[in-house]
């Protein structure tokens, strides 16, 4: 069970009774015991997918599965049935069938077994037979889609994201953490080509891959402009490497001259310095060419930006023209006149309402003033208008005044005046 140790196995793997059932062959007729048949099929289907995911692979074959799931010197007897069922459900697909709908550019790559192996079996023969070829490779659709998404994400987050075309060696280096081997990378590229996210081709014997840039829905075919940019980028890289190499060589000549000078070998030191000058001259010449190439690439990038801006302007003009399709100056003037007329009517209505409210408020103010005046009139006269209260004795009309008597406080009208003591 050496291969099985490379992946995490389910808990029931140690249950002999359970695994004896799982390792037994499937009944020819599923209807005999549907529950057991489906339970065994679900177990092995999930384990096959999980095993591939744990290994970072996207393809399986019957021979590898027999080795991977070997237990106590026994291999599962029903794995061929599992592969047939997964193929019927579309969970796996033969490599040759998987690549059948891509263009002939893949054939010139010569990478992977599916690109050079003849079609020995047809899909209908596979489904109609109980025999599955041991070495026939199948692509797990779920896993290859996951791998394609990971590869595209790695590309767009790398320093190559500004470049649409990459060489295959560059892509292999970039995807080393995602794709375990070259075959897995090819399967992921096939899926991306199916999704119209990449296109592959061969240019002057070199395998290249063009990616769909961020913001684009589909990748465009490789054009002469793309190849021109790719050649300039390759030249930039090669010239940069040569300039760096010449710089190191110049430093080496300088160190040699310093060493020879310490040893008293002045003539040899001078030759080393002359060699350093020649190397520096070549480096300066290459650096000037490198700067020219970089300038051209900058202009191309600027032109592409200008092209994108012009396309955006064109789209904006088209959208604006479409949005103003039914709008004319006459209609606008008519609408403005109607709006002005309605505004004038509204102003008149507001003025009328406001004037009515104002007159009512004025009537209320007048009524308030009148009410106040009535209240003032109803009040008694002030104290100063009344006659003064006599402080001496009071004289009753018709009676003589009685001296010596003082006025007593009257508690009632019947009280009389009493003589003062």
Image (spheres, helix red, strand yellow):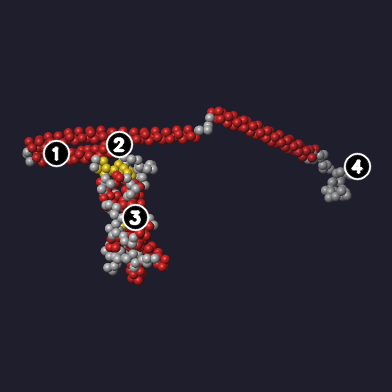
Q: Earlier in the sequence, mark 2 or mark 1?
A: 2
158 on left or right of 411? left
Q: Earlier in the sequence, mark 4 or mark 3?
A: 3
Q: Earlier in the sequence, mark 3 or mark 2?
A: 3
Question: Marks 2 and 1: which is nearer the front?
Answer: 2
Q: Which residue is mark 3?
A: 123
Q: Determine the residue positioned at 32% across, 66% down.
A: 77
| SS class, disc 2 | helix
Q: Which residue is mark 2?
A: 224
| SS class, disc 4 | loop
Q: Determine the residue positioned at 37% across, 66% down.
A: 28
Question: Marks 1 and 3: which is nearer the front?
Answer: 3
Q: Work out how far the residue at label 1 is from the one at label 3, CA to CA, in angstroms.
A: 69 Å
Q: Earlier in the sequence, mark 1 or mark 3?
A: 3
Badge number at residue 254: 1
Question: Marks 4 and 1: which is nearer the front?
Answer: 1
- Percent position of residue 329, x then y: 53, 28
Residue 176, can we see it? no
Q: Earlier in the sequence, mark 2 or mark 4?
A: 2
In this rendering, the answer to whether 92 lies above or below 371 is below
Q: Determine the residue positioned at 84% across, 48% down.
A: 410
């Amino acid at each position: 069970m050496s291969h099985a140790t490379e992946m995490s196995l389910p808990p029931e793997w140690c249950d002999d009774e359970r695994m004896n059932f799982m390792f037994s062959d499937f009944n020819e007729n599923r209807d005999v015991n549907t529950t057991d048949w489906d339970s065994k099929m679900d177990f092995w289907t999930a384990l096959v997918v999980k095993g591939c995911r744990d290994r970072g692979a996207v393809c399986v074959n019957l021979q590898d599965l027999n080795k991977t799931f070997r237990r106590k010197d026994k291999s599962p007897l029903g794995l061929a049935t599992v592969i047939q069922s997964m193929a019927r459900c579309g969970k796996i697909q033969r490599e040759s069938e998987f690549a059948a709908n891509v263009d002939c550019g893949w054939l010139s790559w010569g990478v992977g077994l599916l690109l050079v192996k003849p079609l020995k079996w047809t899909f209908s023969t596979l489904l109609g037979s109980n025999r599955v070829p041991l070495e026939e490779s199948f692509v797990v659709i779920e896993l290859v889609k996951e791998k394609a998404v990971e590869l595209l994400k790695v590309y767009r987050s790398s320093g190559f994201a500004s470049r649409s075309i990459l060489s295959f060696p560059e892509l292999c280096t970039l995807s080393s953490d995602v794709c375990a081997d070259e075959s897995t990378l090819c399967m992921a590229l096939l899926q991306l080509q199916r999704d119209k996210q990449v296109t592959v081709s061969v240019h002057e014997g070199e395998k290249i891959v063009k990616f769909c840039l961020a913001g684009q829905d589909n990748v465009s075919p490789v054009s002469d402009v793309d190849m021109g940019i790719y050649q300039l980028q390759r030249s930039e890289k090669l010239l940069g490497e040569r300039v760096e190499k010449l710089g190191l060589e110049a430093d080496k000549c300088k160190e040699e001259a310093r060493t020879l000078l310490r040893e008293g070998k002045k003539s040899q030191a001078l030759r080393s310095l002359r060699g350093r000058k020649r190397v520096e001259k070549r480096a300066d010449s290459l650096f000037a060419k490198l700067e020219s190439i970089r300038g051209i690439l900058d202009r191309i990038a600027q032109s592409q930006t200008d092209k994108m801006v012009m396309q955006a302007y064109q789209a904006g003009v088209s959208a604006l023209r479409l949005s103003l399709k039914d709008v004319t100056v006459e209609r606008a003037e008519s609408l403005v006149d109607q709006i002005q007329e309605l505004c004038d009517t509204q102003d008149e209505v507001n003025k009328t309402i406001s004037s009515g409210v104002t007159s009512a408020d004025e009537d209320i103010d007048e009524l308030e003033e009148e009410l106040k005046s009535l209240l003032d009139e109803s009040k008694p006269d002030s104290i100063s208008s009344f006659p003064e209260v006599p402080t001496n004795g009071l004289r009753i009309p018709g009676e003589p005044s009685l001296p010596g008597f003082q006025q007593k406080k009257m508690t009632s009208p019947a009280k009389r005046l009493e003589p003062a003591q």
